[in-house]
Image (tube, rainbow, N blue to C red):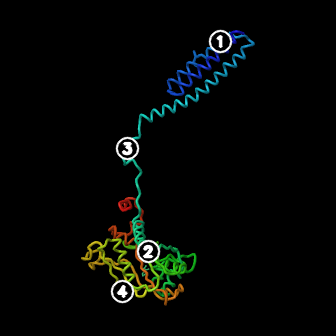
Amino acid sequence: MSETLDLIKMTSDAASEFEIALGSVRANPTPDAVEALRLLFIGRKGKVTLLMEGLRHASKEQRPIAGKTINTLKQQIEEAMSSLKEASANWALDEKLKQTPLDISLPIDHMAPQGSLHPVSLMRRELLREFRRLGFSVFDGPEADFDFYNFSALNIPEYHPARDMQDTFYLREQPNLLLRTHTSNIQIHCMLNERPPLRIVAPGRVFRCDSDPTHTPMFHQIEAFVVDKNISFGHMKGVIDSFMKAIFGSSMKTRLRPSFFPFVEPGAEMDLQCVQCSGKGCRLCKNTGWLEVGGCGMIHPNVFESVDYDTDTWSGFAFGFGIDRMAMLKYKLTDLRPMFEGSYSYLGQFSRYT
Ligand code: PHE
């Protein structure tokens, strides 16, 4: 009986000793301190292990009571030890982090390669920025469109060569459905959807059966048009000139040459002073000093009639040119085709403009 009482008393002493030791190890859970604590209580010669062994001397009746008390303590200690182990691992990690600060001297070529914008995207972005600055809004239209929007409403008659199968991609699915040959179809969509005054810019992909160093079956155009009261040819010339100066620098010169497009009257060809020789004459401009960049003119009354705009009230101008061609001139490229072949090394050259 007395041995049992002693055992229970010793167990409760060991429990409070453990509580105290646990507190101090927890405050600084180094792996050594944690291991020492374990050995001290539940190691081969630990206090609790010895108490277990002492059970042998207890009487048969009392042994279960003392045994239960010691076992409970042992379990509590084991639980505490396992949470201490975790604290100790965290402590070790903290120590390691303190010792090895972030290495900011890692060579930069270990980083992922950086992409760049496609020359057409770069050019389009710059063109749109300048048009917005001049007060234009962006409008979009379909790439696969009906004959009406791409041709008829633009005063392009039935027998016009542009409608020929050799120039235009027609779609099998529906009669009169085709891939637009220019962004001028957006003029019609826009005028039917909105009311004037309009100041619109519309970039997009266009398609023609054509392929050589300066022509690809798909390319990009940008269309700009204005519809308002008392719009004159002079307004158009002013917009084109200030726009080209914004893109190519203030010394850039432009000129308009009489030309014909069914949807404008009068119509003109827009020329840019040669970007290579500044007008002196070279191979690029075939010694003329000028480069042809697009078409323009006053919107034809027949176009206004096809969208039901009163031609006594409204007048307007339109112009369109190739974004890809503009990019070739701006970035001094000689071949249009690699633009659409997707080679990384070719496209990577444009990262400096991004
Ligand atoms: N749509 C014409 C073309 O693709 C360009 C143009 C646009 C001409 C607007 C006049 C007015 O060649």
Q: Earlier in the sequence, mark 1 or mark 4?
A: 1
Q: Is residue 234 above or below residue 11?
A: below
Can you tell me which quadrant of the image ligand 1 is in? Answer: bottom left
Q: Earlier in the sequence, mark 4 or mark 2?
A: 2
Inter-mark Cα distance, 1 to 4: 117 Å
Q: Earlier in the sequence, mark 1 or mark 2?
A: 1
Tell me the SS state at disc 2: loop
- Quadrant position of the C terminus in the picture: bottom left
- Determine if residue 206 is in view: no
Q: Earlier in the sequence, mark 2 or mark 3?
A: 3
Q: What's the mark number on residue 43?
A: none
Inter-mark Cα distance, 1 to 2: 97 Å
Tell me the SS state at disc 4: strand
Give x and y (percent) for residue 225: 45, 79
Q: Which residue has dot 1 on it? A: 54
Q: Is residue 96 above or below residue 289?
A: above
Do the residues under discs 1 and 4 have CB atoms within 8 angstroms? no
Inter-mark Cα distance, 2 to 3: 48 Å
Inter-mark Cα distance, 4 to 3: 62 Å
Give x and y (percent) for residue 194: 53, 79
Residue closest to the eye, 354 or 131: 131
Amino acid type, callout 2: Gly
Which mark lies nearer to you, 1 or 3?
1
Q: Which residue has dot 4 on it? A: 258
Q: Earlier in the sequence, mark 4 or mark 3?
A: 3
Tell me the SS state at disc 3: loop
Q: What's the mark number on residue 135?
A: 2
Q: Which residue has dot 3 on it? A: 106
For residue 288, which quarter of the picture? bottom left
Inter-mark Cα distance, 4 to 2: 27 Å
Residue drawn at x 37%, y 75% is: 243
